Amino acid sequence: MRYTLPPDTVHEYARYGAVVLRGVLTPAEVAQLERGIEHNLAHLSPLALVASQPEDPGRFVEDFCTWQHNPDYAAVMQHSALPSVAAQLMQSDTVRIYHDHLLVKEPGTRQPTPWHQDQPYYNVAGRQNVSFWIPVDPVPLASTLRFVAGSHAGTWYMPRTFRDQQAKWFPEGTLAELPAIDAQPEQFEQLAWALEPGDAVAFHMLALHASSGVGPGTRRRVFSARYLGDDARHAVRSWRTSPPFAGLADRLPDGAVMDDPLFPLIAIK
């Protein structure tokens, strides 16, 4: 399905690193995605984790890399407007699936998602990429995803574990430390949008983002679809990336195009 973006949207993505897309999925596709999420929750993979504390009155569940075993996920990732939109935002001739990511905060979850970038956790180099954050529940402004405008411009910040702030990826001191974003609102412009089912936020994998918990009567089920463009290359790491791709380094050398069955090219219609 072709979903033609206004030129201003492509420009804003390049400038700010995050844009909102209204009605990018049809009601039928939202229903399909909701079925996929509920199936995923009932059949969590070995990569699934509970990202909230035991004393949290809610529950924050994440899972990764299940789209190839979930027909509803696969249909949305391959046959909705998402690949076409990805190509336009990345300004790329090719679109390759990278991975999927489930993020569900059950009612009353207090656990915030702290400020971070995604790409430092990954095994990918290159600038042409996009992630879609797609809720199947209404998301009020208080619990939506927030971004620092323009933070995708190039600086890589130290990735740390969300619970205890440990550096389990890049060695200590090798990347810049995260600034105090919320304490300096005049320096770090934030972008955020309330969302309805069918809407999505598209953001660059280097865009700094965070979110709060959810209220006692609010369930926030979100599916993220991530895509790579022309310049994406395999970045072999000596540590376990998040998500991990076991055995990939044996098939793809460092700097290789991400040409592997795990990351299929999608035909753009």
Image (cartoon, rainbow, N blue to C red):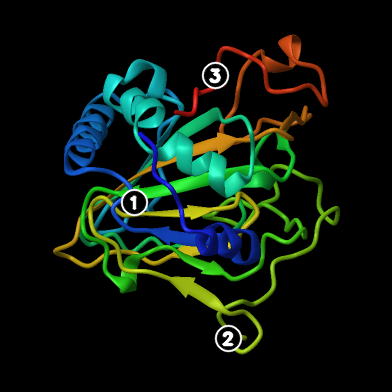
Residue most extreme to the right? 174
> Mark 3, residues whose alpha carbon is within 10 Å: few (<14), some, or many (≥20)?
some
Q: Quadrant of residue 92?
A: top right
| Circle 1: residue type | Pro
Is residue 114 in view from this perspective? no
Give the secondary structure at mark 1: loop
Q: Which residue is mark 1?
A: 54
Disc 3 versus disc 1: nearer the observer: 3
> Mark 2, residues whose alpha carbon is within 10 Å: few (<14), some, or many (≥20)?
few
Left or right: residue 209 versus residue 225 is right
Give the secondary structure at mark 3: loop
Q: Which residue is mark 3?
A: 264
Q: Quadrant of residue 77?
A: top left
| Precedes in sequence: disc 3 or disc 1 | 1
Left or right: residue 261 versus residue 3 is right
Q: Which mark is residue 185?
A: 2
Residue 109 screen position, x and y as percent? 28, 59
Residue 250 screen position, x and y as percent? 74, 10
- Marks 3/2 in contact by CB < 8 Å: the verdict is no
| Precedes in sequence: disc 3 or disc 2 | 2
Give the secondary structure at mark 2: loop
